Image: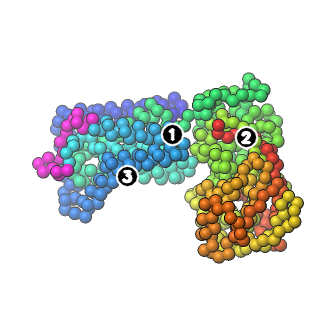
Amino acid sequence: MIDSPRQQRALLLGASASGLAFVVLAALVGNGFSGLVDLDRNVGRRPRTFTEDHDRFSSILIWVAHLTGIWAMAGLTAVVAIALFVKTYRRPAVWTVAVMGATCLVTVGVKYLIGSGRPGSDDPPSTLVDHSFPSGHSSGITAAAGIAIVMSAMLIRRRGLRRLVTTAAIVLAVLVGADRIFLGRFTLTDVVSGYLLGLAVVLIGLVVFDPRPRSIGLLNDPLPEAIPSGHRRVADILNPIKVDDPAGFRAMVDKMAEESGWTGVTWWETTAEDTGYSMAHEAAVSGADLVIAIGGDGTIRAVCEELAGTGIPVGIVPAGTGNLLARNLSIPLYLRAAVDVGLNGQDRAIDMVRVSGDEMEDATFLVMAGMGFDAAIMEGVNEDFKKKVGWLAYVWSALKALMFPAIRVEVSVDGGDFTKHRARTVVIGNVGHLQAGMPLIPDAAIDDGQLDVVLLYPRRFLSWLPLAARVMTRNPRTDDTITRMRGREVVVRTPAAAPRQLDGDLIEPGKELRAECDHGRLLVRVPR
């Protein structure tokens, strides 16, 4: 987690300070320093007496001890490591296991080296046979809290959620330490030493082994260039409200670009009035060899629309809430990894879709367009609520709009005759998956030159349940509930104006959508 010499010095200082403080405490305890003995006796007397007088409180403390013991922490470590590995975050998985393993080994080693007895040794509980210094629960929970904080800093984009994780981790560590003292099984010195040991191992782990995924450029040979150039220039188009620290983000991207061999980096920022069109145009005419779009689906669509047909590849850094294009292209949602793909990935030609209709200007989309229920979902999303809870805002809006009225629809594919249907929603898709990986159009491909149309018509409220099951299981059967069509050109029309959306952005309600696939129109950077 080191991006600058200043951060490296801070980590080294923190690791040295916590390690030195632990060594000093170990030396004092090992030599039976009377001042510590008196302090521990005075601090621990009241908590232990309180616990002895309240049996129910004692039972709660014992359960806390069991839930944060060595076997529980080992199981939690295994679950976290497996989850990270499955998500292809292999270095974070290795780092997590290494930190927890090192914490356990050092704790056990110091326990037997110091050989400190338990508090209340005149009548010790028969189940406690190990030594007290340092507290294994305290070192383990501190290491776990450190891992949680590091992983949240890496993988969680929302500052509020990161702060919540950090606060919860610190509070839990404090509660576990207090549990040790109130049960009378460890002294204040034992608990503090456990905190210091766990913190030192986490910080040393960050200095020794960077848990962030390694760059594609380091793992793979350079891709061949049709026309090698000595000056590789990259333009970055940033929606500044989508990242917590724009200046810090810029510094990170600049460093990664330099390490990846890009000799010039130029920055543009979008505005509320211009979501990226003019910036992408300026980047193209200024001679950029690569343009990286950093923002939500709206920013990325604007940049891609402007650069379509230019031959300039677009790197996509998904900093929004939906990020459907990135998900369907297997671009990681971890911003640093997405930047790495943009700088070092391979180019892929994908389709764009030209769309027109009544009450709207001609436009394009990359993911999907819709009329009816799915557009009503976008319409019902409260922006302030979305900033707080992210994609859950779409779930809440969907629940409210489940019984959006059915509409009469006529559909024509590739100039054929119009067929009549009833539907609650009509989706014209260039990709196959929605939020949470829902395979609404499982056979769709973003580079096949075809559009896929899906009409959903659950007749009653409860009809959504079997419909969702059919979608999730990729059941190919079609009937009045699910109708599927495919073609290069699609026209959808309704007798009355209906809500409409393009890539999650609402447009004016209307009676018609005309969509035509533009095959291989855009170059994007995807993982190798």
Which comes sooner in the sequence, label 1 or label 3?
1
Which comes sooner in the sequence, label 2 or label 1?
1
**Three-letter residue code for mark 1:** Arg
Question: Which residue is painted at 62% across and 58% down in the image?
Answer: 438
Q: Is mark 1 on a helix, strand or loop?
A: helix
| Residue 40 in the figure: left or right of residue 167 | left
Q: Where is residue 333 in the image (x, y as percent from the top left)?
A: 60, 46
Q: Residues within 10 Å of mark 2 (few under 14, many from 20)?
A: some
Q: Mark 1 points at which residue?
A: 90
Question: Which residue is painted at 64% across and 70% down in the image?
Answer: 402
Residue bounds of the magenta highlight: 109-127
**Three-letter residue code for mark 2:** Arg
Instruction: Please tell me whether residue 360 belongs to the stretch shown in magenta.
Output: no
Q: Residues within 10 Å of mark 3 (few under 14, many from 20)?
A: some
Task: Select label 2 or label 3 by which is in front.
Answer: 2
Q: Mark 3 points at which residue?
A: 172
Q: Where is residue 167 in the image (x, y as percent from the top left)?
A: 44, 51
Report if residue 237 is visible in the image. Answer: no
Indicate the quadrant where residue 331 lies: top right
**Nearer to us in this view, 472 or 263:** 472
**Three-letter residue code for mark 3:** Leu
Task: Select label 1 or label 3 by which is in front.
Answer: 1
Q: What element carries label 2?
A: strand
Tell me, for residue 348, which label it has, or none: 2
Question: Which residue is painted at 31% across and 55% down in the image?
Answer: 64
In the rendered view of the protein, which quadrant contains the C terminus? top right
